[in-house]
Image (cartoon, rainbow, N blue to C red):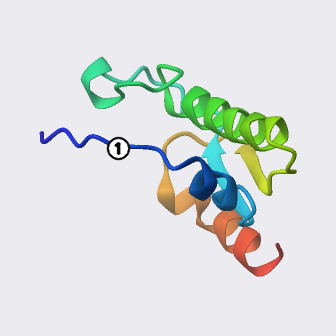
């Protein structure tokens, strides 16, 4: 694994919050992930990480006088399954 140092550009991150984005995650995607796979993430499973990331980006936008266009869709009864989440993803793209 190659580590990459990312230097955040505040203005670009704020611009990113203005792009409509829907994060879709299954509510059953709660298997604990290995620590080395999620360095710096807030949460130990994909559901928590997704929820926390969207909340943090929305808060970042608000703290800077913007309203974020990021949202999260948590789909009940589905875990980590791309094929079962496709219909929800398609709906998010077609009906923003």
- 68 left or right, relative to 3: right
Q: Secondary structure at mark 1?
A: loop
Question: Which residue in the rendered view is the most extreme toward the bottom?
Answer: 94
Q: Residue furthest left?
A: 1
Asked whether residue 83 appears in the rendered view, the answer is yes
Q: Residue at x 77, y 50 (%)?
A: 71
- Total label count? 1
Q: Nearer the viewer, residue 16 or 81?
A: 16
Quadrant the N terminus occupies: top left
Q: Residue at x 70, y 58 (%)?
A: 22
**Counting other residues with Cα less than 10 Å from the Cα at mark 1, is it few (<14), some (14-19), or many (20 or more)?**
few
Query: Percent x, y for residue 15?
Result: 67, 61
Q: Quadrant of residue 38?
A: top left
What residue is rendered at 50% in x and 62% in y? 83
Q: Is residue 28 visible?
A: no
Q: Residue 78: x, y in percent?
A: 61, 43
Instruction: Out of 71 and 9, give the one closest to the viewer.
Output: 9
Question: Quarter of the image containing the C terminus?
Answer: bottom right
Which quadrant of the structure image shows residue 17?
bottom right
When the figure is inspected, residue 7 is found, relative to residue 29, above or below; the finding is below
To which residue does mark 1 refer? 6
Residue at 71 percent across and 75 percent down: it is: 93
- Does residue 35 appear left or right of residue 51 in this picture? left
In this image, 87 relative to 46: left or right? Answer: right
Task: Pick the residue in front: 96 or 55.
Answer: 55
């Amino acid at each position: 694994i190659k580590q990459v140092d990312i230097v955040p550009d505040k203005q670009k991150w704020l611009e990113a919050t203005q792009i409509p984005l829907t994060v879709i995650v299954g509510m059953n995607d709660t298997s604990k992930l290995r620590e080395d796979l999620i360095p710096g993430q807030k949460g130990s499973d994909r559901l928590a990480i997704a929820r926390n990331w969207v909340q943090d980006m929305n808060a970042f936008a608000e703290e800077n006088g913007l309203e974020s266009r990021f949202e999260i869709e948590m789909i009940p009864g589905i875990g980590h399954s791309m094929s079962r989440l496709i219909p929800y993803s398609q709906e998010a793209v077609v009906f923003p």
